[in-house]
Image (tube, rainbow, N blue to C red):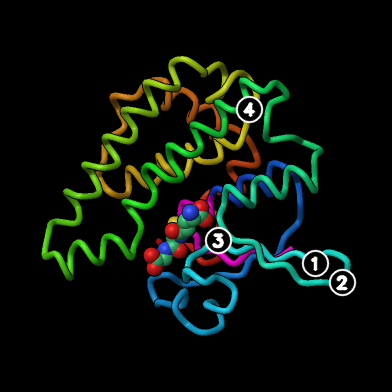
Amino acid sequence: MKLYNYWRSSSSYRVRLALHHKQLPFEYVPVSLIKGEQHQPAHRSRSASGTVPVLEDVVDGKVLLLTQSVAIFEYLEERFPARPLLPKGAVQRSQVRALAELINSGIQPLQNLAVLNYVKDTLKADQAAWAKHWIGLGLAALEQQATQTAGQFLVGDEFSWADCCLVPQLFAARRFGADPSSCPTLLAVEARCLTLDAVKNAAPEAQPDAQP
Ligand SMILES: N[C@@H](CCC(=O)N[C@@H](CS)C(=O)NCC(=O)O)C(=O)O
């Protein structure tokens, strides 16, 4: 498999976490969001929305281009069920999906590069204040929900794809100046995740295109 991604993209980081947790080898292909490579024809042919991550896999001799990190989680879970990232029970599975969506559709789109550029360049508004506001609201909701579901990890005691969304989201929160210190449940889960080898290997600063 090949992963088209960018070191500090939170959606890319999610998929790296899933691949490392499942111990699936992949080729790392950097797409520089800072240089605008996501808009170049080569990448647009992989991703209609001009975003990362894109996971390339070959199935029955055919090249598949998979987009959307949560859909990629689903694909990896079905195709490579060993070292699962979804719990067994229906209730816990729905909790994992709900927490992942809180981040995937409730927070990340509002901090995305294209949105922040529009806020700054077209609306002439304060992009830093925008990002901090929406990330802060999103993390507060996540913290409240996590107090009902967390054990060692965000849902129960197994690392799941909710954690694969949480760790990158907290990384992004700090990058955008949103202080997560009022979210003790999220911070305790993050601290536990950061001790795992898969999480260390997927970290932004450990990637070949990382910048100081
Ligand atoms: N829902 C998508 C979000 C993808 C996305 O927004 N990716 C960002 C980086 S985290 C991106 O490529 N942004 C490029 C841009 O805004 O120009 C997913 O989960 O994969």
**For the residues carrying marks 4 and 1, which lies nearer the camera in this image?**
4
Q: Position of residue 193 (x, y in %)?
A: 55, 32
Q: Which residue is mark 4?
A: 93
Within-10-Å neighbours for mark 3: few <14, some 14–19, many 20+:
many
Provide the residue span drawn in magenta. Answer: 1-13
Does residue 49 appear in the picture of this structure?
yes
Q: Residue at x 25, y 49 (%)?
A: 131
- Is the CB of the residue bearing disc 3 within 8 angstroms of ligand 1? yes
> Considering the image in quadrants, where does the N terminus appear?
bottom right
* Residue 73 in the image: above or below residue 37: above
> Judging from the image, what secondary structure is the residue with disc 2 in?
loop
> Judging from the image, what secondary structure is the residue with disc 1 in?
strand
Asked whether the residues under the numbered discs 2 and 4 touch, taking CB atoms below 8 Å apart as contact, a structural biologist would say no
Q: Residue at x 59, y 61 (%)?
A: 67
Identify which amino acid the numbered label 2 is placed on: Gly
**For the residues carrying marks 2 and 3, which lies nearer the camera in this image?**
2
**Mark number for residue 61?**
2
C-alpha span from label 2 to label 3: 22 Å
